[in-house]
Image (cartoon, grey):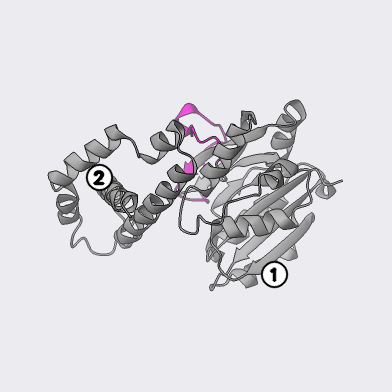
């Protein structure tokens, strides 16, 4: 019986995917004890060629689902449908797993068979210059179910119906799964040795508008999440609470977004300095709360 399925989805990340898959294939557990299920969610770049090259190096079972773009929730469900492992381990196409990745997830499940197992993630700006694989508190994420690095019994994920495909835009589909599992009393444990490197390249000026668009999409799905889960956890996570909304309204009255745009104008195409990157993130945050208010009143 296959003990674990590594499940990941990809969309136009050909430049990273080969390294990501090689890491998934390079595990310390026996090759016949796990599988990799990849969903290509309508990529239009060189992803199919990368997948064909990857097949030549896959010692474990490697299943590929190619489909028209359905969004991440739909892609995850396609992967869940093809998974055969007793446990399903979710990761992403910008994540480099360590060789002990599957082993550590299975080790935690042996002690906590019904639980969610959360692994550690270290953010890196390059996959060629990696820091020592040691997790520390500065890498901590409070997410209960974060598909960068999380596993659960496959039967449990199927029993709740997988991912909610009404989350068709960016964000929150994994948080929704976590909230549903938490409501059922499913325990979560953390294993910092089930470690991954999460690729977060330095921001460029050309990234700013994409960040703003993504923030607005995330705000719209945040409202959908809060309506599905009218609970303080959702309100706190999404910012749909009186304190955060009032602070955001105060910043809007001060014209903060306009001032941030002024400081980020006419920079030319280049990497942002650390200060500029902070300003860009602040601008995206203002866009998030502006769109949040609009979506709440639709």
Question: Residue at 72% across / 52% down in the picture?
Answer: 25
Dominant secondary structure of the residues highlighted in magenta in the image: loop
What residue did someone put label 1 on? 52
Would you say residue 141 sits in the magenta stretch? yes
> In which quadrant will I find the C terminus?
bottom left
Q: Is residue 8 above or below residue 14?
A: above
Name the outermost residue toward the right.
Answer: 1
**Residue 4 position within the rendered picture, expressed as x and y whole percent measured from the top left:** 76, 45
- Tally the marks: 2
Q: Is residue 58 visible to the viewer in this orientation of the structure? A: no
Would you say residue 172 sits in the magenta stretch? no
Local secondary structure at mark 1: helix
Q: Pointer 2 and pointer 1: residues touching (CB < 8 Å)?
A: no
Question: Residue at 80% across / 43% down in the picture?
Answer: 3
**How many residues crowd around disc 2 within 10 Å: few (fewer than 14), some, or many (20 or more)?**
few
Of mark 2 and mark 1, the one earlier in the sequence is 1
Decide if residue 82 is on the left or right side of residue 132.
right
Dividing the picture into quadrants, the one containing residue 213 is bottom left
Decide if residue 50 is on the left or right side of residue 32.
left
Q: Which residues are magenta?
A: 123-145
Q: Is residue 34 above or below residue 68?
A: above
**Residue 284 position within the rendered picture, expressed as x and y whole percent measured from the top left:** 30, 51
Decide if residue 256 is on the left or right side of residue 79.
left
- Pick whichever, 243 or 116, lies toward us: 243
Question: Residue at 65% across / 31% down in the picture?
Answer: 186
Question: Residue at 52% across / 66% down in the picture?
Answer: 12
- Pick whichever, 58 or 223, lies toward us: 223
What residue did someone put label 2 on? 275
């Amino acid at each position: 019986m296959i003990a674990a399925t590594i499940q990941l989805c990809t969309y136009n990340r050909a430049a990273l995917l080969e390294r990501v898959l090689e890491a998934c294939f390079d595990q310390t557990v026996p090759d016949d004890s796990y599988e990799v299920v990849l969903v290509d969610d309508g990529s239009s770049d060189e992803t199919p060629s990368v997948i064909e090259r990857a097949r030549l190096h896959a010692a474990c079972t490697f299943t590929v689902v190619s489909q028209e773009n359905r969004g991440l929730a739909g892609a995850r469900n396609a992967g869940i449908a093809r998974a055969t492992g007793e446990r399903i381990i979710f990761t992403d196409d910008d994540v480099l797993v360590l060789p002990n990745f599957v082993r550590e997830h299975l080790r935690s499940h042996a002690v906590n068979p019904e639980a969610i197992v959360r692994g550690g993630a270290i953010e890196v700006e390059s996959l060629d210059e990696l820091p020592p694989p040691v997790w520390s508190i500065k890498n901590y994420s409070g997410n209960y179910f974060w598909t960068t690095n999380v596993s659960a019994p496959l039967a449990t994920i199927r029993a709740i119906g997988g991912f909610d495909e009404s989350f068709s835009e960016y964000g929150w589909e994994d948080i929704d799964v976590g909230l549903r599992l938490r409501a059922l009393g499913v325990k979560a444990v953390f294993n910092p040795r089930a470690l991954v490197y999460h690729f977060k390249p330095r921001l460029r000026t050309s990234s700013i508008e994409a960040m703003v668009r993504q923030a607005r999409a995330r705000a719209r799905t945040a409202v959908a999440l809060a309506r599905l889960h009218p609970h303080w956890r959702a309100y706190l996570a999404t910012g749909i609470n009186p304190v955060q909304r009032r602070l955001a309204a105060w910043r809007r009255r001060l014209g903060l977004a306009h001032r941030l745009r002024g400081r980020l104008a006419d920079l030319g195409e280049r990497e942002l300095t650390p200060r500029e990157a902070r300003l860009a993130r602040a601008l995206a945050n203002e866009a998030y709360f502006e769109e949040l208010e609009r979506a709440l009143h639709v």
